[in-house]
Amino acid sequence: MTKQEISEQYQIDENGVITSPGKFEREMYYAVSFWGDALDGFSNSEEYLEDGTVVAVFEINKPEIEEFPELIGNTILKIWEDDNGFVFCVVD
């Protein structure tokens, strides 16, 4: 999903953070797109948290940066869902 498509479904503040209540609340808007890719099995690899939660790991390359410029300077994005259904996204 593009930023435009995401902003049609969610409220996004001036910093790109989703403010709409729900599973993506307080995450960057691009989490929606990466979460969809993770569910479709498009992550580069997987890791596991101590509690066994599966974490999808994405390499951030030129196509991702072109789509989501906020990712400049990062090489890895990790995304997962907790037991309450909230999605968490971190970049490195």
Image (cartoon, rainbow, N blue to C red):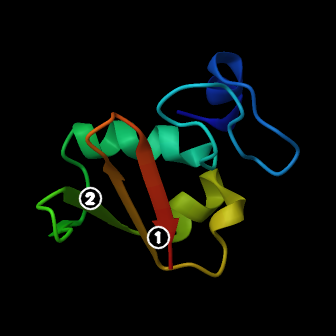
Q: Which residue appears at 69% of the width and 18% of the height?
A: 8
Q: Which residue appears at 59% of the width and 48% of the height?
A: 27
Q: In the image, residue 89 lies at what x, y percent?
A: 47, 57
Up the image or down, 91 lies above or below 15; here it is: below
SS at badge 2: strand
Q: CA–CA distance between discs 1 and 2?
A: 13 Å
The residue labelled by disc 1 is 60
How many badges with numbers are in the image? Answer: 2
Q: Which residue appears at 53% of the width and 37% of the height?
A: 24
**Left or right position of 7 against 59:** right
Q: In the image, residue 3 lies at what x, y percent?
A: 67, 36
**Left or right position of 3 against 41:** right
Q: Nearer the viewer, residue 50 or 29?
A: 50
Q: Nearer the viewer, residue 86 or 58?
A: 86
Disc 1: CA contacts within 10 A as few (<14), some (14-19) or many (>=20) = some
Disc 2: CA contacts within 10 A as few (<14), some (14-19) or many (>=20) = many
Q: Quadrant of residue 57?
A: bottom left
Up the image or down, 11 lies above or below 82; here it is: above
Q: Residue furthest left?
A: 52
Q: Quadrant of residue 86?
A: top left
Q: In the image, residue 4 lies at what x, y percent?
A: 71, 28
Identify the disc placed on residue 20: none
Please state which amino acid type lies under the numbered disc 1: Ile
Q: Nearer the viewer, mark 1 or mark 2?
A: 2
Identify the disc placed on residue 56: 2
Q: Nearer the viewer, residue 38 or 52?
A: 52
Q: Quadrant of residue 78?
A: bottom left
Please state which amino acid type lies under the numbered disc 2: Ala
